[in-house]
Structure formats: structure tokens, C-alpha cells
Amino acid sequence: MILALTLVCWSVRVEAGLESFRDACSSWSPHVATIKSVRWCREEECEAFGLTNTIGEWFEKRREIVVLAGYDWPGGRDGLRLTLAHEVGHALGLAHSREGIMKKDWEPPVADGPAKKDFESLK
């Protein structure tokens, strides 16, 4: 199952600079989300997407994760990975919660990936 999940995570189209998606995707093992692409928000579409007040978005109909370009990620690149893991959680059908990776904002404590509570929400 892990090999199959790894192949699924590597088959998604990912723009340069967003390669940490692979780790974010794999962190949800054994659960698999159908995601077609992960990309940066284009300047002209960021406002239309509402990505001025949020840093990432999951678009169900397009099966696409879009991330705000130029954001100063808390924790640097690790913050980007955590945001991508959060968006994969949405792709799996999870809503925001009060704790775990699905917590809505960056108030401490920040989860370092999907937590037991997040996985329990998938059952």
C-alpha cells in the first residue's frame, strides 16, 4: 500500500518550488486523495480565488491545490509543507478542526503533520 501511495503522490503535477507536496501527501498514508495538480496562484487570479486572506485552497471540482505565491511561511519551507498537508486533508474530505493539521490558522501549538485526531476523523 505504501508503494502505491508513493506512486500516487509522485503522479500529481507539481509546479517548481512545491515539491514538498510529495512528503505532505505521503504523510496521510494509507489514505489517498485524488489530486490532479498543485500549483502557485497566478498574480491575476489570487484575489479572485480569495487567496489574499488565506494561503492555500483546495478546489474540489478541479481537483487542484493552489498556494499563495510569495507568502512568508511560518517555519520557512516546513510551513509550506504543513500548509500542503492541510490542503491534502481537505482533499480527503476533512473540514477545519480545533487541533491537528486541520486547525485553521497558525496559532500554537502547530501540528507537525497529520495527528491521530486527524486520522480518526477519516474513519
Image (cartoon, helix red, strand yellow):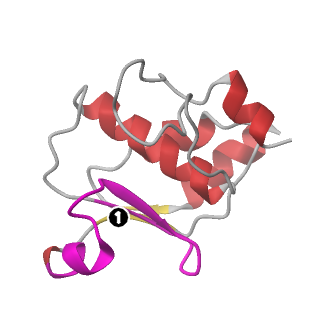
Q: Does 99 sit above or below residue 30? A: above
67 vs 115, left or right, is left
Total count of labels: 1
Residue extent of the magenta highlight: 44-67
How far across and down, in percent of the image, does residue 95 sit? 61, 52
* Image-quadrant location for residue 67: bottom left
What secondary structure is found at the residue carrying circle 1? Answer: strand
Query: Is residue 51 found inside the magenta-colored segment of the image?
Result: yes
> Mark 1 is on which residue type?
Arg
Evaluate whether residue 30 shows in this view.
no
How far across and down, in percent of the image, does residue 105 sit? 37, 39
Outermost residue toward the right?
A: 123
The crowding category of the residue bearing disc 1, from other C-alpha atoms within 10 Å (few below 14, some 14 to 19, many at least 20), is some
Task: Identify the residue shown where x is 83% and y is 39%.
Answer: 1
* Image-quadrant location for residue 46: bottom left
Evaluate whether residue 38 shows in this view.
yes
How far across and down, in percent of the image, does residue 87 sit? 50, 52
Q: Does 64 sit above or below residue 103? A: below
Q: Which residue in the protein does label 1 denote?
A: 39
62 vs 48, left or right, is right
Task: Identify the residue shown where x is 32% and y is 33%.
Answer: 79
